[in-house]
């Protein structure tokens, strides 16, 4: 920790003090001649030098303020350059389902999981993305845990943005995860690549081609986190939407996708 100045040259503003000091000096000379002519005693030194001291003190404070002093601290952050991870949030409408109208929905439970997981990956750059029928990166992998937390809390929301197309049933297409490879979302030097997908598993069928794309060297390891409860319902009001029912086969779909 040390003291530094953002604009050190601005401290030259202290030179402006020469103007009032010169005026004070001229007044003191004139005062001295008048006292000598009238045979008056000299004033106490403190009273004579007081204005000059005040001018110098004010100039010093102005100069210091103009230089913008700051206290700098240096800390060392260790970051892996051979590994990157992405936390991918399913933001389709079904992620708004919850056990009750005032209870955390699936997306909120996914947020909490991600925020609790992030400190365990302290040295690994982690990014944030969302998925519906496409993948949208919100924050590219970074070691900054604060940026990660802010993005998860503020940028991730149900149907923001909505799917590119209208779907009568399911909008989530886990096959879109291939974008992490085809669109080069990982840094070239990252040899260890991980996707942590937080989803309810209520997705369209997963294309077999996805596994082939993700296996391309150096390969992408995918971890599916099933955010789902059998009593989840969508509550547009205090009454559950009668047209939505949790899919009990969603877990099996994720197991098949993970096995592939």
Image (cartoon, rainbow, N blue to C red):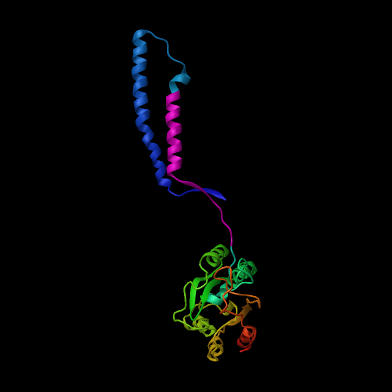
Residue 184: x %, y % from top left? 48, 80
Residue in the foreground of this view, choosing between 112 and 147: 112
In the rendered image, which quarter is residue 99 located in?
bottom right
Taking the image as drawn, is residue 225 in sight? yes
Q: What secondary structure is the magenta-colored segment mainly?
A: helix
Residue at the far top: name it.
Answer: 39
In the rendered image, which quarter is residue 227 located in?
bottom right
Residue in the foreground of this view, choosing between 258 and 40: 258
In the displayed structure image, the side of residue 110 where residue 44 appears, left or right = left
Residue 208: x %, y % from top left? 55, 91
Residue 65: in magenta span: yes
Tell how many labels: 0
Q: Quadrant of the C terminus?
A: bottom right
In the rendered image, which quarter is residue 43 located in?
top left
Residue in the foreground of this view, choosing between 224 and 179: 224
Determine the residue positioned at 36% across, 32% down: 18
Residue in the foreground of this view, choosing between 255 and 179: 255
Residue 52: in magenta span: yes
Residue 79: x %, y % from top left? 58, 68
Residue 51: x %, y % from top left? 42, 25
Taking the image as drawn, is residue 85 in sight? no
- Residue interval drawn in magenta: 50-76
Determine the residue positioned at 58% across, 82% down: 202
In the displayed structure image, the side of residue 113 where residue 172 appears, left or right = left
Determine the residue positioned at 34% across, 23% down: 26
């Amino acid at each position: 920790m040390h003291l530094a100045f953002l604009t050190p040259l601005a401290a030259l503003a202290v030179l402006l003090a020469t103007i009032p000091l010169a005026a004070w000096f001229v007044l003191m000379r004139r005062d001295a001649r008048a006292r000598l002519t009238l045979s008056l005693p000299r004033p106490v030194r403190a009273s004579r030098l007081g204005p000059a001291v005040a001018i110098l003190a004010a100039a010093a404070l102005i100069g210091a303020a103009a230089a913008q002093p700051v206290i700098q601290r240096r800390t060392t952050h260790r970051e892996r350059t051979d590994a990157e991870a992405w936390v991918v949030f399913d933001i389709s409408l079904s992620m708004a389902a919850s056990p009750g109208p005032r209870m955390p929905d699936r997306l909120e439970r996914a947020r909490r999981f991600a925020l609790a997981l992030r400190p365990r990956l302290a040295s690994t750059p982690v990014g944030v993305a969302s998925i519906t029928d496409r993948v949208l990166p919100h924050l590219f992998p970074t070691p900054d845990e604060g940026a990660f937390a802010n993005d998860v809390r503020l940028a991730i929301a149900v149907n923001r943005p909505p799917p590119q197309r209208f779907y009568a049933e399911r909008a989530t297409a886990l096959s879109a995860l291939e974008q992490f490879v085809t669109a080069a979302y990982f840094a070239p030097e990252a040899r260890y690549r991980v996707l942590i997908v937080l989803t309810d598993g209520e997705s369209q069928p997963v294309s077999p081609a996805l596994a082939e794309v993700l296996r391309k060297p150096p390969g992408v390891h995918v971890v599916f986190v099933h955010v789902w409860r059998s009593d989840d319902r969508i509550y547009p009001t205090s009454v559950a939407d009668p047209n939505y029912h949790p899919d009990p086969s969603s877990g099996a779909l994720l197991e098949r996708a993970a096995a592939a």
